[in-house]
Amino acid sequence: MDRRQFIGGASALAVGAMAPGAVSAQAAQEISFFYPVAVGGPITKLIDAYAADFQKDNPGVAVKPIYAGSYQETIVKALTAHKSGTPPVTSVLLSTDMFTLIDEDAIIPFDEFVKTDADKAWLKSFYPAFMENSQTGGKTWGIPFQRSTVVLYWNKEAFKEAGLDPEKPPQTWAEQLDFAQKLTKRDAAGNVTQWGIQIPSSGFPYWLFQGLTTQAGAILANAAGNEVKLDAPEVVEALQYWIDLAQKHKVHPPGVTEWGTTPKDFFERKIAMMWTTTGNLTNVRNNAKFPFGVAMLPAGKRRGSPTGGGNFYIFKKSKPAEQQAAFNFIKWITTPERAARWGIDTGYVAVRADAWDTPAMKDYVAGFPAAAVARDQLPHAVAEFSTHDNQRVTKALNDGLQAAITGAKPPAQAMKDAQTEAMRILKDYK
């Protein structure tokens, strides 16, 4: 299942500190929780089960998730509800929505709920790479839940057929190109029957591109979210490498390649290597009819990938008791055991190190070592691109990428134009 498919629903989290005997005297408190996923499917069953289990452990609380589509749809619904005075108490939204939610005065920091030594230890337990998109200005605004990185998947049978070691993925940009050349197949008429590699450029092109820019040595945005460097030489170098895979070397499909169908192309052997989210791990495991590998992204000047995925947020206009209840639920669902279970069931990266020490996770990794690749890549990871007025700034970057990928503009000009537009949008936040 795909990192960007899990999109929001409003869930009623009712969290309370009532004694079990008090339930008959008072109805369970209900707390709204927007969760990002389309209605139906395995993810809703998992979240529903967590909600029921939490209510068993906290009889004064009723958790009733509401599912409402994509991440984009969920934040629109959450902010609309906030402006009307009836926001969810909590929601899972993209980590990159942090600045937008702060600017809308829609959320409160978690720090005011962190009081005990146990609370402090819990807050410190999350991987630092995931906290980069969760903290700003000395405060914690989001708690990592369903998080991911970009990784490389490869078809081991295709490697073997091309004379490559099926157990050794490319380690560098140069090897990635060399392998892709060996893996690209053409028929007698010269038509490609198997592409060497595919890096999708629709849906979330900036996210995949950030893997390349990080490897080229660039950081696209500052930690304050009010300055970007989209036209740096390293950024242009990364874009040129991506475009050259298709236009110069002809080992990558030309034009815009679809995010949503890239895994299907992989399953159908139309591509031998692909970049996509770790959130697709379970999908690939269930649907690939050939042995496959998972590896960290190849290195340019360095290794690197952006983190991605969703955080929990608590909304400001909800009642204090509801906010405390939501905090209790968020702590409950991010224990080491539950973080491990969520990672095993979904393919997302378990968000805290001690989750990987649980018996369930140890058994899972022993039988499926690929599950640990995203965790091992975290020391090389950077914060996903995020700024104030994030959707408009990200659109400027995505528009620049599309212009370069389709050949409408040279890479340097496309990135210069994107930088100009982004800084115009951000001038009010300086």
Image (cartoon, grey):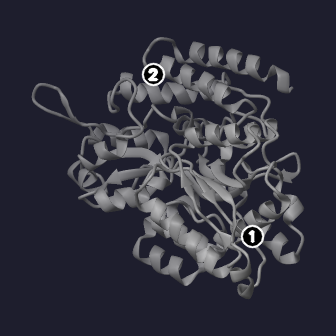
Nearer mark to the viewer, of 1 and 2: 1
Q: Secondary structure at mark 1?
A: helix
Viewer-nearest residue: 246 or 164: 246
Amino acid tagged 2: Ile
Pointers 1 and 2 in contact (C-beta within 8 Å): no
Q: Residue furthest front?
A: 25
Above or below for 357 versus 282: below
Query: Residue at position x 44%, y 14% from top?
Result: 407
Quadrant for residue 353, please give it: bottom right
- Give the residue at mark 1: 328
Quadrant for residue 255, please give it: top left
Q: The C terminus lies in which quarter of the figure?
A: top right
Residue 430 visible within the image: yes
The image's mark for residue 405 is: 2
**On the picture, is 285 further left or further right than 128?**
left
Q: Residues within 10 Å of mark 2 (few under 14, many from 20)?
A: many
Above or below for 104 versus 31: above
Across and down, in percent, residue 354 comes to 66, 75
Across and down, in percent, residue 61 comes to 69, 71
Across and down, in percent, residue 10 comes to 60, 52
Viewer-nearest residue: 99 or 193: 99
Above or below for 392 versus 285: above
Amino acid tagged 1: Asn
Q: Residue furthest left?
A: 188
Q: Secondary structure at mark 2?
A: helix
Q: The N terminus lies in which quarter of the figure?
A: bottom left
Query: Residue at position x 76%, y 65% from top?
Result: 327
Q: Earlier in the sequence, mark 1 or mark 2?
A: 1
What's the distance in space between the residues labelled 1 and 2, CA to CA? 46 Å
